[in-house]
Amino acid sequence: MTSRHVDVLVVGAGPAGLAAASLLATTGARVEVLEREQSPGGVPRHCAHRGFGNRPHAWTGPAYARLLTEAAVHAGAGLRTGVTALDWAGPRALTTVGPQGVQTLAARAVVLATGARERPRAARLVPGTRPAGVYTTGELQQAVHLYGQHIGTRAVIVGAEQVSHAAADTVRAAGARVVALVTELPRPPAAPARTLDARLRHRTPVLTGTTVTELLGRGRLSGVRVRHRDGRTATLPCDTVVFTGDFVPEHELARRGGLVLDPGTRGPAVDGALRTSRPGVFAVGSVLHAVESAATAAREGAHAATAVRDWLTDGTGGDPTDPEWPGGVPLVAEPPLLRIAPNRVTPADRLPYLLRTALPLPRPVLYVTQDGRPLHRERCRRATAVPHRPLTLTARWTHLVDPDGGPVHVTVT
Amino acid sequence: MTVTASGALPAGPYDVAVVGAGVVGCAIARRLAHHPELRVALVEAQDDVGQGTSKANTAILHTGFDAVPGSLEARLVREGARELAAYAAESDIPVERVGALLVAWDTEQLVALPRLAGKAVRNEYHDTRLLGPADLYAREPHLGPGALGALHVPGESIICPWTTTLAYAVQAVRGGVDLHLNAPVTHAGRTDGVHRLGTPRGTLHARRLVNAAGLHADTLDRSLGHDDFTVTPRRGQLIVHDKFARALVNHILLPVPTALGKGVLVAPTVHGNVLLGPTAEDLDDKRATGSTAEGLHRLREQGRRILPALLEEEVTAVYAGLRAATEHDDYRIAAHPAQGYVTVGGIRSTGLTASLAIAEHVTGLLAGTGLDLGPSRPLEPVRMPRLGEASPRPHQRPELVAADPEYGVLVCHCERVSRGEIRDALAGPVPPRSLDGLRRRTRARAGRCQGFYCGAAVRALFEEAQR
Ligand SMILES: Cc1cc2nc3c(=O)[nH]c(=O)nc-3n(C[C@H](O)[C@H](O)[C@H](O)COP(=O)(O)OP(=O)(O)OC[C@H]3O[C@@H](n4cnc5c(N)ncnc54)[C@H](O)[C@@H]3O)c2cc1C
Ligand SMILES: Cc1cc2nc3c(=O)[nH]c(=O)nc-3n(C[C@H](O)[C@H](O)[C@H](O)COP(=O)(O)OP(=O)(O)OC[C@H]3O[C@@H](n4cnc5c(N)ncnc54)[C@H](O)[C@@H]3O)c2cc1C
């Protein structure tokens, strides 16, 4: 087993990891990015559609992935694909495996950018048979856009959010028909234009208040049973079903390392500088909040780069119980809010917060309190907050936080 | 080596045809392969071995402590467990001797424990021990509150059911057995002392017939003129939890059987997952291997009591298997010497454990029908891919990766399956003919993402090998 040392080890070459690596390498740090896939770019690699980057609809996923990769490599970051970070070998050291075998890589700082995945059928406990033709969007996009595989002729899409429509586009691009998009929500969660486009231009039904209750078919899928909330049931004949959305952070490394996880996001808990509970270990992108836009992930990567740089210059970079590592206090989103990220707060934090709601909220107002003390009140920019779409909170109030006080609560009316 | 999956079946008569390539049929075929002068065919309806009940069980290598004392099943389970443990050790089949705890949740169950210990003794199992709540919670700190005590059965083990069946099949095929897949026997007749087994791929001729057709053993038995038993499929649904759950449980947590029926178990698997199940539902459809909302709900309710933290972990798979239950309280293994026929029916919930002993027993019965087995030789030992988590996986073995870097290229990230392992499985003596078959041989796509990351890449490797 060989062992090496670098300044910063970034795990995951998606938008978040690549953005962090680019900026850090520019400042002269020795940065190494580990990516377990054969090519870098993360999820955008297999999103053929436009909608990536800062300007709306600027790039296709693959173009965006290439752009970020080139920037990182150009800045001098070492990028190693086909290498998996398996586990921790020390507070800031990882064991990796690749064609060269098992290695240990030690660093002064580690940035976790391991992304997120969709919950597959089994995890959603959808009963029935176990036929072929059952996908997640991630697998579907790779099958169609990266491998040109045949996927069937009639597909039902489970979900009706942004990513569900992306899955529907992929199905159509593969020459198959989209039978319907099905969502349990009473109203379609995607942007209205997206839903209208599906309904009118593609004549694809978007079935709301509808649950997939069973998969049918032996060998190959033959249909899905659905139930409407009014009790009606039906069978939608299809040979393909795509389970979309319902993202969960790819938090294996964070968990194996014993990093504190946030119960709302299931990702590592971080403060506004994207510091995890372990000194010198940072986390960025979808692993923190599964999922927001790729541009958000990349912005976080860039934001974390500043904090990593500070740690490299000021931090001892050695002692894992370094007292200079600010812990912050927990930041908790109360129902119907589902989660908030970052989810710890220190008075110096400047990064805006990302929230999600379980229910549609007309004219939402967010309240921030600590130990019963009001810190902030903010009217949201959106007229209505809806499930599956981001809701933001500024960080203008963090200087009011008592670092020795109790948890900070965010409520909504 | 002969494995066929299409085309006409060979015309010449075999000495023995074994119908059904489940764990039992494969074990029998492997046993017969010790006799090089026998021509043996293993005939299977589906496109792979072990694709019936043998792929969908709770994967426990039982001690037989709670069998019906004096039954054939009790003896074959007891002997089979010993033989399989030894065989697994020499063949790299993953086994972990984790031991079982029968957990009592009420006084009725608590008073049943000494009775079960007594039954174990009558089954020649002497190592059980009663545990009080303090000992129990020391062993299983994540157990839900309210347990009153337990019976510890240290010999109960967990095993990989897929590797076991495949190991038998590989050794059988290497030893000269012809494996014919996609060959459902739809009718059987016998003329001039030769069985004629009709399949869509033509008729197969054999002087002796072994019926190891699992759920369909009664149908085949009837077509040969017997009315000995009826198989009533008893469905068992199971939920598999992600590897993070493995740290929650140290033993197989068995329910205490009472008059009110049997509860469900929580068991670790050799692949590092945790099972919750099975249900027990008597059905009449032998193909009803689907899961149901009600079944899954009930399992989770019961699981919440046994191991509350389990429900917080991701589910990686849900499946159901059908036990070949009959109206009898024992296996239905019988020889019909005049017909040159042995039926191996009613191998209900212990067939994996008993498989090697069943094979030995059936071989004896075949000899009793007048079959001359001829000389015997030891079989070339088989080394199976190491799918278990208790020993180093290929990517963790530096000498292996140094010799062949493909073992360092991970394709399935959740289960950490390398391209080298997938390549080996695709080129194996009994290769997979579907992605499910590839999964059973390598664990590729069996993890928490179920193909989100690797599904298309694995499929590409599979399809490339089919060309
Ligand atoms: C189907 C789909 C469609 C989307 N469409 C859009 C869109 O149109 N517009 C938009 O802005 N956003 C879209 N998104 C969201 C966007 O993809 C994410 O915000 C973005 O990819 C997050 O970047 P990331 O770097 O955090 O994670 P990812 O892109 O997920 O990258 C994580 C990387 O880490 C690697 N990795 C993980 N664990 C390890 C390990 N142990 N060792 C080594 N490497 C590891 C992974 O292989 C992966 O490459 C979409 C997401 C999905 C799933
Ligand atoms: C939920 C559950 C849990 C269990 N747990 C355990 C356990 O923990 N430990 C244990 O030891 N045992 C367990 N068992 C029992 C064990 O799985 C079975 O006893 C064993 O798999 C039976 O093997 P078999 O070869 O007889 O049957 P099968 O695996 O069903 O094989 C029969 C084969 O015959 C083929 N076939 C049928 N008809 C024909 C035909 N006409 N022509 C050609 N081929 C045909 C089928 O396709 C099938 O492949 C469990 C069973 C279930 C259902």
Image: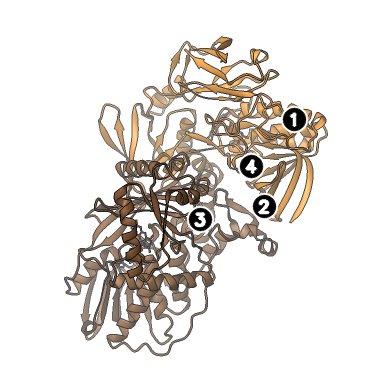
Residue A114 vertical position relative to residue B467 in the rendered view, above or below: above
User: Chain letter for orange?
Assistant: A
Q: For the residue labelled by badge 2, is the local secondary structure a helix, a strand or a loop? A: strand
- Residue A374: where, in percent of width, then height? 57, 10
* Labels 2 & 4 near each other (Cβ < 8 A): no
Which residue, given by chain and number where applicable, does mark 2 sit on?
A97
Q: Residue at x 28, y 88 (%)?
A: B370
- Callout 2, which amino acid? Val
- Callout 3, which amino acid? His
Using a 10 Å C-alpha cutoff, classify the residue at mark 2 as few (fewer than 14 neighbours), some (14 to 19) or many (20 or more): many
Distance between the Cα atoms at labels 1 and 3?
Answer: 40 Å
Q: Residue at x 43, y 85 (%)?
A: B36
- The mark closer to the camera, 4 or 3, is 4
Distance between the Cα atoms at labels 2 and 4?
Answer: 17 Å
Q: For the residue labelled by badge 3, is the local secondary structure a helix, a strand or a loop? A: loop
Output the chain of dot 2. Answer: A
The circle on residue A257 is 4
- Front residue (pair A120, B251): B251
Output the chain of dot 1. Answer: A
Residue B467 vertical position relative to residue A298 in the rendered view, above or below: below
Q: Are marks 1 and 4 on the same chain?
A: yes
- The mark closer to the camera, 1 or 3, is 1
Output the chain of dot 3. Answer: B
- The mark closer to the camera, 1 or 2, is 1
Q: Is residue B45 visible?
A: no
The circle on residue A323 is 1
The circle on residue B271 is 3
For label 1, being within 8 Å of ligand 1 is answered no
Output the chain of dot 4. Answer: A
- Chain B, colour shown: brown
- Front residue (pair B279, A193): B279
